[in-house]
Image (cartoon, rainbow, N blue to C red):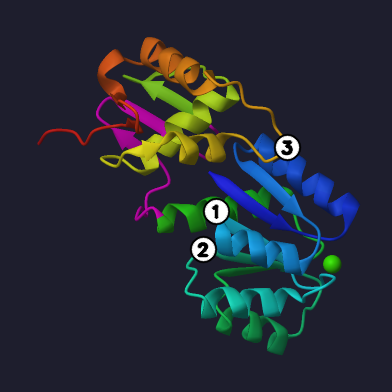
Amino acid sequence: MRILLAEDDIMLGEALQEALIAQGFAVDWLKDGESALAAATTEDFDLLVLDLGLPRRDGMDVLTQLRQRGKEVPVLILTARDTPPDRIAGLDAGADDYMLKPFDLGELGARIRALLRRRAGRARPEIRHGELRVDPAAQRVFLREQEINLPRREYMLLKELLDHVGEVLTRDKLEASLYGWMEEVESNALEVHVHHLRKKLYPELIRTMRGVGYLIPRLED
Ligand code: CA
């Protein structure tokens, strides 16, 4: 899961980035509205966390432009503008949720999970796939009710594939959902993560589509 964070306050941005990474997201952080709009227009993000008071282009304008360009990425507004007309304007401009500063980082994570869950077409918080169960809030994975400990990136990869069961995800898409822009990716990192997941869970869970990417096939009825 890849999140674009648009926030010009350095201290808050750092805290947010750190908290979201710890909650299992890949986070790209931009500090002005113009570059956030450009990035959200040209790249695929699963969610945009958008401050309203941004330099170079106001957050409301970023949101309006994105929707005009037909971008459907879920947007969660973070702002200190707290009058009801502000909130109404934000939601009516196409935001999916709205949090007032100061806010609780745990609550922010929960709201993000709710938005992503809906986007993936799920209402249930847990993900089940055969004998596999994932609890995204706790970032825990169980196979036949035995907990399997996965390092952060393996967890992120599994979650990404499970959010798109039956769909082939390209290497580029998977790498983007596991690593932020600033993070170095070893060329065989993805293969290594897939190898570990197959070993720790079960081999036929993840299918390789040569030259394209990977998928978790739908379960047979
Ligand atoms: Ca700001």
Q: Residue furthest bottom?
A: 85
How many residues crowd mark 1 within 10 Å: few (<14), some (14–19), many (20+)? many
Q: Are marks 1 and 3 in contact (CB under 8 Å)?
A: no
Which residue is located at x 68 percent, y 35 percent?
22
What residue does disc 2 label? 73
Horizontal relation, residue 98 to residue 100: left or right: left
Question: Which amino acid type is marked by label 1?
Answer: Phe
* Membership of 121 in magenta stretch: yes
Residue 26, given in percent of the width and then of the height, sits at 62, 40
Q: Nearer the viewer, residue 212 or 131?
A: 212
Q: Nearer the viewer, residue 121 or 8?
A: 8
* Membership of 68 in magenta stretch: no
What residue does disc 3 label? 182
Which residue is located at x 38 percent, y 43 percent?
163
The kind of secondary structure element at disc 3 is loop
Q: Nearer the viewer, mark 3 or mark 2?
A: 3
What residue does disc 1 label? 45
Q: Nearer the viewer, residue 40 or 136?
A: 40
Question: Which amino acid type is marked by label 2?
Answer: Val
Q: Residue furthest left?
A: 221
The kind of secondary structure element at disc 2 is loop
Instruction: Check mark 1 vs ligand 1: CB closer than 8 Å? yes or no.
Output: no
Residue 219, given in percent of the width and then of the height, sits at 18, 33
Q: Residue furthest front?
A: 211
Q: Is residue 144 visible?
A: yes
Mark 3–mark 2 distance (CA, rounded to whole Å)? 22 Å
Give the quadrant of residue 131: top left
147 is higher (above) or lower (below) than 63: above
| Residue 31 marker | none
Q: Which residues lie in the magenta part? A: 120-139
